[in-house]
Amino acid sequence: METKKKSAKKSEVAGTLRDLFLDSLKDIYYAENTLVKTLPLMFEQATNQKLKTAIKDHLAQTKEQVVRLEMVFYSLGEKAEGKKCPAIEGIITEGNEVMNSTTEGSVRDAGIIASAQKVEHYEIASYGTLAAFAKTLNERTALDLLLRTLGEEKKSDTLLSYIADTNLNSQAVDGKLQSKDLNAV
């Protein structure tokens, strides 16, 4: 049986928590910059006005988060740089498949919300881990910046759930608003 070659070069192997912290920062920096390019497509494909507004607002927020990550790198004395993130690439690929395989309107909007929430959950996990690393490493500036972003990501996830729950998912049942749901709106 053939052994697999190591995918990371020896110089790329994280030997300390700080190394892992920096590697993880590069990962989320790549992810956020990728989202800056992806969110406009989601905006274009969405039809629900609340969803379009949430996506537009999140794009502006994501751009601020990229700047905030650059501040984290700076606070650590490091250059801000990204490292390809297979996780976000996979989530975005899946989201594109959802948009391409759904009917325009409430069904696609429900799929966009589902895809966006997968992104949010990835970001929440990433920022939570990064904040824990920053705390352990006693990187107070980085910790404060990361916690701010973590809070924003949690709020975005909550907003997406609210939009889906208010009546969008009900509309997607048959691609339109159900008459029995009119009273609940």
Image (spheres, rainbow, N blue to C red):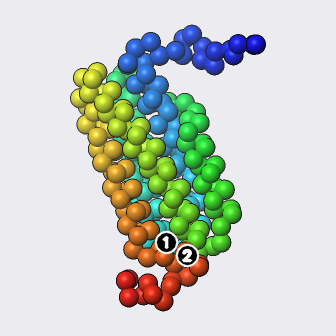
Q: Nearer the viewer, residue 39 or 133?
A: 133
- In the rendered view, would you say 51 is above or below 11? below
Q: Quadrant of the C terminus?
A: bottom left
Q: Write the residue at 60% across / 17% down.
A: 8
Residue 176 in percent (x, y) is at 55, 82
Q: Secondary structure at mark 1?
A: helix
Q: Write the residue at 69% across / 63% down.
A: 101
- In the rendered view, would you say 171 is above or below 1? below
Q: Badge 2: few (under 14), some or many (20 or more) residues near its Cα, within 10 Å?
A: few
Q: Write the residue at 49% across / 49% down.
A: 119
Q: Nearer the viewer, residue 82 or 101?
A: 101
Q: Are marks 1 and 2 in contact (CB under 8 Å)?
A: yes
Instruction: Determine which quarter of the picture holds residue 97.
Output: bottom right
> In screen coordinates, is 137 left or right of 30?
left
> In screen coordinates, is 14 left or right of 132?
right
Residue 38 can be seen in this image:
yes
Q: Nearer the viewer, residue 20 or 79?
A: 20
Instruction: Determine which quarter of the picture holds residue 132.
Output: top left
The residue wearing badge 1 is 169
Residue 36 in percent (x, y) is at 51, 50
Q: How many marks?
A: 2
- Mark 1 to mark 2 CA distance (whole Å): 7 Å
Amino acid type at mark 1: Asn
Q: Secondary structure at mark 2?
A: loop
Q: Badge 1: few (under 14), some or many (20 or more) residues near its Cα, within 10 Å?
A: many
- In the rendered view, would you say 41 is above or below 7? below
Q: Quadrant of the N terminus?
A: top right
The residue wearing badge 2 is 173
> In screen coordinates, is 62 left or right of 96?
left
Residue 63 can be seen in this image:
no
Amino acid type at mark 2: Val
